[in-house]
Image (spheres, rainbow, N blue to C red):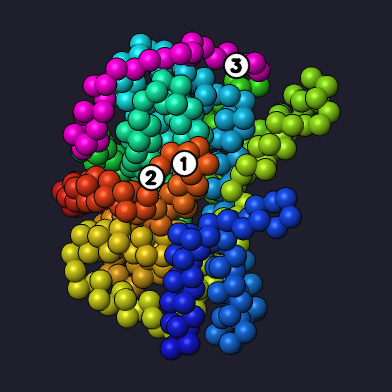
Amino acid sequence: MTATLVISILTIICLIAAIIFKPEIRIGKRSFETFWMVALLGMAMLLIFGKVTFPEIIANITASSSINPLKILVLFLSMTILSVILDELGFFRKLAYLALKKANGKQLRIFLYLYITVSILTIFTSNDIIILTFTPFICYFSKNAKINPLPYLISEFVAANTWSMMLVIGNPTNIYLASAYHINFLAYFQVMFFPTIISSLVAFGLLLLLFRKELTKQITITESYEYELKDKKIVGIILAHLIICTILLAVSSYIGLEMWYICLSFCLSALLWLGGYELLKKKQKFLLLKASLKRSPWSLVPFILSMFVFVMALNKYGITAIISADLSALNPVFGFGLSSFLTANIINNIPMTILYSNILATVVPVLQTPAIYAAVIGSNIGAYLTPIGALAGIMWMQILKKQGVKLSFPKFIEYGMLISVPTILVALLTLLLEF
């Protein structure tokens, strides 16, 4: 037990250090993210010291259970690839330009329209993809208009990580917890609808209070914001894939199909359509197809599998049972909600979710359901307390650095504290009223 705990703690410390001080390393001409390497190294230490064995890992990873990490990865990556393809085809960029055009050069209106655009897209796609897609666009627009990009960037980040609570597919943490406890698409939506709406309104109000002075300043746009989709037919086909896939996910429990199978089927179909389209257009290099696959977050595979093994080890030696006993003594909504909110910012929200899926298994049934949804809320809103809270935050900070936007870790935490703490309290109170 002691060795497992020591290896786990050291891995978490190294993970945080890597995220803050060395998020990437270069090997030759290629850059690699370090977070998954640290997790993989930690898993290797567990194997070397005999705390877990290969047969145990294989048995757990291939088990025909709802928390099979391979199924969850397939589900998340499939939905992500669908979103990435639409982004590569310019669909999200087109929507962003339409929002800017509608705003007619007024900062407050631009702020509102971008918030609404990001929020709606996040619900039906994924918070990570929307953040990675819109961040460079916001940086470019702000530089061109000679305005401070931070109000828009913070708003985008908060919107994406609050509205991601609405549907199961909005965040891999939602997918993991819902899958672990057999919560279907519609049941999840029914519970999370009001906490998402109310907490998002609170978050937006706080954003307006924080940036009201900046948003009244004059704006000078030096470029016409017009953008035409070059490949409307294939955009329509891929968009139809995403819409029909989402509808089938909503009724998956009624038609007897697992969510991962639905997502994988539509993802493969979309890739075939895209490849066939490029072939017909005589684009032999399949540039869009390659770019879509290259941009997908493949580094999540070793990271999630490694963290899954850590939780296996903690569960094996009774550590999760000890944590569960302490949390079970608290109110299930505020106990699990606030603790998951804080834990996500110590070990990141994905490993936190994997850990909590095991902790929640020992909670008595009458308290288990509200505790599960509280952990979902903590995993989403916790993403904007500190940059460590979610992988999207880590990648977001890297993009800002490349774009020359100055936002230090302390400043991020300052904004995070002011917005996330009231927002999660309101979200958890709303959830409490539902139970």
The residue where tag 2 is placed is 407
**Residue 213 is drawn in which quadrant?**
top left
**Marked residue nearer the N-terminal end (1 or 3):** 3
Instruction: Tell me the quarter of the image containing the N terminus.
Output: bottom left
Q: Is residue 302 above or below residue 103?
A: below
Residue nearer the viewer, 158 or 269 = 158
Q: How far across and how far down the image is residue 211, in percent?
A: 24, 32
Q: Is residue 12 above or below residue 390?
A: below
Q: Given contact means CB atoms under 8 Å apart, are the residues at marks 1 and 2 in contact?
A: yes
Q: How far across and how far down the image is residue 196, in percent?
A: 28, 40
- Residue at 64% across, 72% down: 58
**Element assignment for label 2:** loop
The residue where tag 1 is placed is 400
Residue nearer the viewer, 120 or 11 = 11
Q: Residues within 10 Å of mark 1 (few under 14, many from 20)?
A: some
Magenta-span inclusion, residue 215: yes
Q: How far across and how far down the image is residue 373, in percent?
A: 31, 54
Spatial CA span between label 1 and label 3? 27 Å
Report if residue 351 is visible in the image: no
**Marked residue nearer the N-terminal end (3 or 2):** 3
Residue nearer the viewer, 329 or 396 = 396
Residue nearer the viewer, 126 or 136 = 136
- Residue at 57% across, 61% down: 34
Spatial CA span between label 1 and label 2? 8 Å
Q: Which residues, given as a range, are shown in magenta?
A: 206-232
